[in-house]
Image (cartoon, rainbow, N blue to C red):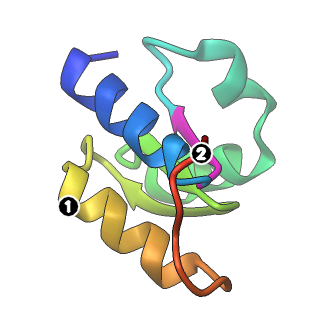
Amino acid sequence: MPETLASDLRWLADWRRDVFEYSPARQPGACAASTEIAALVTERAGDCLPAVGVDGVIPSTGADPTRVELGDFALRTSASVGLRPRP
């Protein structure tokens, strides 16, 4: 995983968001085990990878998202009010 994406995913996880990257090059087992990713790959002929999941939703496909995009995804998928970093 590129260091920028790795640090951005850690940053988002620190804000109590459930995040995961699906990349066949970096996490082949996770891609193979995910029915959602398998459906996306079948539907889009593999053009959907890498994909990032935020809070159980896969809002980013086809490219690594920026930190700003990750934050936006988390805010849009969050049912809670107010994000607080983990202690």
Residue 86 at x, y percent in the picture: 59, 45
Q: Which mark is residue 45?
A: none
Is 65 in front, or is 61?
65
Quadrant that contains the C terminus: top right
Give residue 43's quadrant in the image: bottom right
Q: Secondary structure at mark 1?
A: helix
Which residue: 34% across, 16% down? 1
In the figure, is residue 39 to the left or right of 49? Answer: right
In the picture, measured across the screen, residue 25 lies left or right of residue 70, that is right
Q: Which residues are magenta?
A: 17-21
Mark 2: amino acid = Arg
Please give the name of the residue rendered at 38% of the width and 53% of the height, measured from the top-left corner: 61
Look at 61% across and 53% down and name the residue there: 16
User: Residue 81: x percent and y percent?
Assistant: 59, 87
- Main secondary-structure element of the magenta-colored stretch: strand
Marks 1 and 2 sit apart, C-alpha to C-alpha, by: 19 Å
Residue 45 location (% of width, % of height): 45, 46
**Seen from this angle, which residue lies furthest front?**
87
* Callout 2 secondary element: loop
* Residue position for label 1: 68
- Residue at image mark 2: 86
The amino acid beneath tag 1 is Val
For label 2, the crowd category at 10 Å Cα-Cα, with few meaning under 14, some 14 to 19 and many 20 or more, is few
Of residues 50 and 6, the one drawn nearer to the viewer in this rendering: 6
Q: Earlier in the sequence, mark 1 or mark 2?
A: 1
Query: Looking at the image, can residue 46 be seen?
Result: no
- Residue 29 can be seen in this image: yes
- Give the percent coordinates (x, y) of residue 38: 68, 43
